[in-house]
Image (cartoon, rainbow, N blue to C red):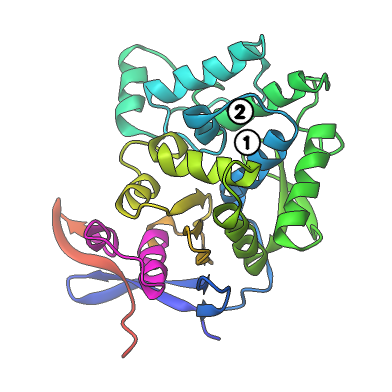
Amino acid sequence: MSDLIVEVVRSGFVESVHSVRVYAVDAHGSPVMVHGDTSSLVSPRSSMKPLQALAMVRAGLPVENELLALACGSHGGERFHIDGVRKILAGAGLDESALRCPEDLPLDTEALHQVLREQGGPSRILMNCSGKHAAMLATCVANAWPVDGYLHPGHPLQRAIRSTVEELTGERVAATGVDGCGAPLFFVSMTGVVRAFRRFTLADPGSPERRIADAMRAYPEWTSGTARPEAVLMRAIPGLMVKAGAEAFDAFAFTDGSAGAVKVDDGGTRARVPVTVAALRALGLDAPELTELATAPVKGGGEPVGEIRVRPASQ
């Protein structure tokens, strides 16, 4: 099956193209939209955060609601995100000095400007994965596991996460790398990721899986940011759970068990959201808000002169 193509059209000419792999299944788990080699290994990056959080919840992570959504999130560094990270840490008797994610600046533009106006600089708590790291530390404290070395693949926390990833994907982890935040990164297939995401939305109410899905869907701005596409999608389609990852990966699942994953082969983030919208629509999931996300403007001189779009099927 050939890859899906996303075109960057400027002034009527196709300026660039992105090849994209897509795997989407209906409520019964039957493939509906398949492009590219979806059985080969991928690096889902932060799309794996709900699986990491599941291992932590099973191990006794004592957070709920918006803080649980934050534990699954790649936040923008908005004020409420940072306050939430501090709350998770304080609940475990820790502060931000315990974090071992790298120093960074906020992803959110306004939050970034605020830091710069206040003459601040990069810090660990501003890094988009600090919510996950705070939750990892809180899980260690809850289990009397060592806080030092919590990112080492041999640490009890990371062993529990690996076991959970293998359980939900139905695959053995083929390789282990290091994510941008320093945490172990597990390589699996796109089909495995979709299999895992279905487990969250099909789980029984009150189960750890369902608690994570419900938290992400109830507090979508805590998993990404107030205006990020993932939050827009979850607000537009009640029952939808979406988690983006670096290098242009997306994974999602709906309340009926339909689910999908998207990987832009060259890591071009600009192609990710239009394909995710196309996959959602192929599954019959749509809303007016998706129209603006289905394409992205290409500008010249500050004005729209083209668009980023999924190549029409007729081409």
- Image quadrant assignment for residue 50: top right
Residue 157's x, y, as percent? 79, 33
Q: Residues within 10 Å of mark 1 (few under 14, many from 20)?
A: many
- From the viewer's perspective, is residue 149 above or below residue 73? above
The residue under the point 54% across, 54% down is: 201
Residue 191's x, y, as percent? 64, 69
The residue under the point 49% across, 24% down is: 126
- From the viewer's perspective, is residue 215 above or below residue 139? below
Q: Is residue 295 magenta?
A: yes
Residue 298's x, y, as percent? 23, 60
The magenta segment: 272-297
Q: Is residue 74 left or right of residue 149?
A: left
Separation of disc 2 and disc 1 at Cα?
6 Å
The amino acid marked with disc number 2 is: Pro
Q: Residue furthest front?
A: 205
The residue under the point 17% across, 57% down is: 300
Quadrant holding the C terminus? bottom left
Toward the viewer: 194 or 82? 194
Toward the viewer: 97 or 215? 215
Question: What SS does tag 2 mark?
Answer: loop
Q: Which residue is mark 1?
A: 181
Is residue 96 in view from this perspective? no
Q: Residue furthest bottom?
A: 314
Q: Which residue is mark 2?
A: 102
The residue under the point 42% across, 27% down is: 77
- Image quadrant assignment for residue 153: top right
Question: What SS does tag 1 mark?
Answer: loop
The label shown at residue 101 is none
